[in-house]
């Protein structure tokens, strides 16, 4: 029923005379108490442990706490060793071997192999055990490449969904955060602001200043009323807008601005810087007073109201 393997001479060893296990059977996770009746060098016992590889994931047992050694009779050199073992898997589990280390001048090792099996049942119900067994049997039959194929398909599907979601998010972000196109009046006012900060007046480049100024107004009026104004003379431009819904102030400012530009560009008139700034203000008034005539694109009305 039991086997003793002694590392030194038998007279110096610890011998097993009897053992008990309680409970006699149990379930996975239960703790079983192993009591060993020992004889021999019991007063010199230094350590007692179950031979279990705690790093083995397939191990059937694990030791709970530290073993106890209780000397029963020092004269007869008998003692009781108590170990607590927890069952980790179901089945008829063979009790682990026990190693006893004693010291009597030299260290002595005694390995006791216990020939006993403990019935341990699963914590699953019978129905669950049948389902689990069926699943295990099915997994053993299916070739491994099938699983790799399934993993690949699942990975491809997940990757495709992630890419589609990322693409949709990028499109949404670009659509909601993209800068709104400028309206015609905003564009024209930006052009005038750039002209004012170009330092043309300080460098007395009046012809270049008035050429740019008249070009901005010409392009603005042409795009406002949908005709090509860049190749028209000043008088032709005024004729084209004669029937347009412009108020008297706008017509006066437009006429004066074109006349001033022609004087500088063609008659080599040298204006004062103050005159140039008045012409710039006149151009801004023309744009602001005609802005209500613009046909805003879809959604532009709400943007103007928010501004």
Image (tube, rainbow, N blue to C red):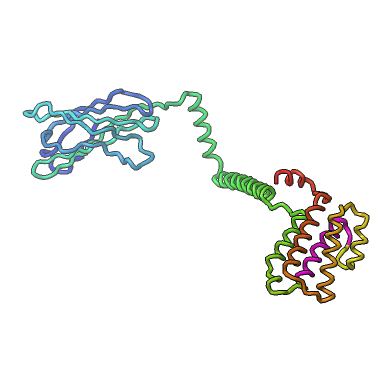
* Percent x, y of residue 200: 71, 71
Quadrant location of residue 203?
Answer: bottom right
Residue placed most toward the observer, 178 or 255: 255
* Percent x, y of residue 282: 78, 60
* Percent x, y of residue 66: 23, 34
Residue placed most toward the observer, 6 or 55: 55
Q: Is residue 73 above or below residue 53?
A: above
x 23%, y 35%: residue: 3
Q: Main secondary structure of the magenta part?
A: helix
Can residue 184 be seen by looking at this rendering? no
x 20%, y 40%: residue: 5
In the rendered view of the protein, which quadrant contains the N terminus? top left
171 inside magenta stretch: no
Quadrant location of residue 262?
Answer: bottom right
Q: Is residue 200 above or below residue 144?
A: below
Residue placed most toward the observer, 240 or 183: 240
**Magenta region: which residues?**
209-227
Q: Is residue 282 above or below residue 19?
A: below
x 90%, y 62%: residue: 238
* Percent x, y of residue 230: 86, 66
x 22%, y 32%: residue: 67
């Amino acid at each position: 029923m039991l086997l003793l393997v002694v590392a030194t001479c038998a007279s110096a060893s610890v011998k097993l005379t009897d053992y008990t296990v309680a409970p006699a059977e149990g379930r996975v996770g239960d703790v079983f108490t192993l009591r060993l009746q020992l004889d021999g060098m019991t007063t010199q016992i230094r350590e007692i442990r179950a031979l279990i590889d705690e790093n083995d994931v397939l191990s059937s047992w694990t030791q709970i706490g530290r073993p106890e050694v209780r000397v029963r009779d020092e004269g007869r050199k008998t003692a009781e060793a108590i170990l607590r073992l927890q069952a980790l898997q179901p089945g008829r589990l063979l009790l682990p071997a026990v190693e006893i280390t004693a010291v009597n001048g030299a260290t002595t090792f005694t390995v006791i192999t216990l020939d006993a099996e403990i019935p341990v049942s699963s914590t699953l119900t019978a129905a669950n055990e049948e389902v689990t067994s069926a699943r295990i049997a099915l997994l053993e039959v299916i070739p491994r490449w099938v699983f790799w194929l399934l993993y690949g398909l699942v990975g491809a599907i997940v990757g495709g969904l992630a890419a589609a979601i990322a693409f949709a998010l990028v499109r949404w972000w670009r659509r909601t955060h993209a800068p709104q196109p400028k309206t015609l009046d905003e564009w024209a006012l930006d052009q005038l602001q750039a002209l004012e900060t170009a330092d043309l007046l300080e460098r007395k480049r009046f012809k270049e200043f008035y050429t740019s100024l008249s070009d901005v107004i010409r392009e603005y009026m042409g795009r406002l009323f949908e005709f090509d104004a860049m190749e028209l003379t000043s008088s032709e431009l005024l004729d084209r807008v004669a029937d347009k819904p412009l108020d008297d102030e706008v017509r006066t400012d437009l006429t004066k601005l074109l006349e001033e530009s022609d004087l500088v560009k063609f008659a080599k008139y040298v204006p004062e810087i103050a005159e140039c700034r008045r012409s710039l203000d006149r151009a801004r008034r023309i744009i602001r007073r005609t802005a209500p005539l613009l046909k805003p694109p879809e959604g532009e009305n709400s943007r103007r109201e928010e501004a």
